[in-house]
Amino acid sequence: MRLRAEALARAWQGEGRRVEVIAESDEDGEEFVHLDGQGNLVHRICGSRSYLFKAPGPLAPPGHPHLRYAARLAEKLLELELLWNRKVDELVVIEPRRAEAMLQRALILTRRGKPGPSDPAHTLPTSAAIHALDVIVPTYNRIEELRLSLPLLLDEVVAIGRPGLEARLTVVHQNEELPARLFAWRPELERHPALRFVFATPPGLTHARNAGLAATRGDLVVFVDDDELVEPGFLRAHLQAVVTHPGAAGVVGRILSPTEGLITSTHRAIGQIRATGFVDTHFESEDESATLVPLTPMGGNMSYRRAPMDHWFGPAWFDETLGGSAYREETSLALEIFRRGGYLVFAPRASLTHRESSEGGSLNQDRKSLARRIEHQSLEYRFLRRFYRGLGPLGPIAALGSYLRDLRDIPRVKTLVAKSVIHAGAYARASLYTGGRQGWPDTLPR
């Protein structure tokens, strides 16, 4: 049975189909996604995480783990179909040691369809070599942070550049006087051959990212925030990851926090978007035991191949209607990448420290204002409505789970009322939004 499944997987790969595997989790019940040796996506699931069996009593009978796994398997199949646009064509059960254990290991072959002109959403351009690499740094009101981060990034750009690989650093500034202030501090920056400045207005993170894309042409585009300090070998690790995994649309790097000290987590749930919309982050992980596949990056350390991204989204990849805090902008983009058959890989050696500056920033937000808090929460609801789009009329209802999660640990009535006002205003704002991101369809690609 296993040999038949593996032979079928190889045959389907030869036809240009995406092959995905669902198997039991092998990491203390953790659920995660990784690539196997043949480049197949492997979804690791755990029966104890079944939503159906979370309630005590008759729905959680002891001594029957196969029932839990069967329930979680069914839930995962629905999640892949309805939320992630992964259509399941055939289920092959392998290693049926006994009748009650038949569902403890399953190989799911998910047909993505043969690429062709009639199916442009799934027609991927052939992976090409990386001849040019661009680093894009959006910045707003953070001159002091740039004085720390810019020299480290320039060192990385110079170190990786060589004949056949052009490397550049583009700072997208949203304060007109910023270049002059930097040149007054370090005059040599004005003549640096690998550094350029691009002005973007009005201030906004997604607009700044798209402005950086328009001003560059590199085959690999790396996005870094202005308050982050990269470690030696940062760019080399991003480049090595896409070279090693030519089928990946992009790379997610490791992010450390000075407020939490040095974290050496080997947690495997890296950037995993759960069916509730909650994200298990764990971007501090250093695990290299498997090629992990995050479902979302963190915007301050991510890179993308330009060819497939331009193919899917055109020259502007980021949704500029996500204004203000731009919350969920990178997760919204990652969601659309996966729905089109793409995926990202985790590169723990592409490491940096996020200083988490409270001053300035391209986010251009004031969290203390009630209006700003409502606007920020409305972006969460807009993402959830997009995430649950495959549920049809139930999607807007499912999005209300964000409100219920936010109320679980509220100690005071006053806080409860404030939270309720914020969520009500945010939900109404998201519901009234009728605009769209050009190039992103209102229906799931099939």
Image (cartoon, helix red, strand yellow):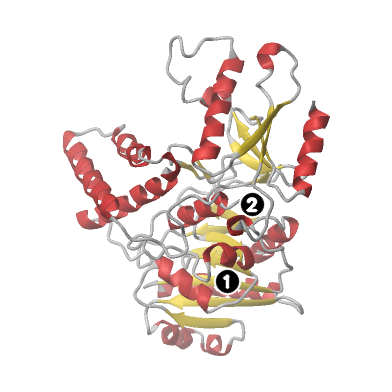
Looking at the rendered structure, the kind of residue marked 1 is Val
On screen, residue 13 versus residue 195, left or right, reads right
Q: Which residue is mark 1?
A: 135
**Spatial separation of the CA atoms under disc 2 and disc 1:** 18 Å
Residue at the (55%, 47%) spot, across then down:
295
Res. 291 mark: none
Residue at the (68%, 60%) spot, across then down:
237
Looking at the rendered structure, the kind of residue marked 2 is Val
Of 72 and 314, nearer the camera is 314
Residue at the (47%, 37%) spot, across then down:
275
Q: At which x and y percent is residue 31?
A: 58, 34
Q: Earlier in the sequence, mark 2 or mark 1?
A: 1
Q: At which x and y percent is residue 355?
A: 46, 60
Q: Which residue is mark 2?
A: 345
Of 315 and 301, nearer the camera is 315
Secondary-structure class at tag 2 = strand
Residue at the (33%, 61%) spot, across then down:
435
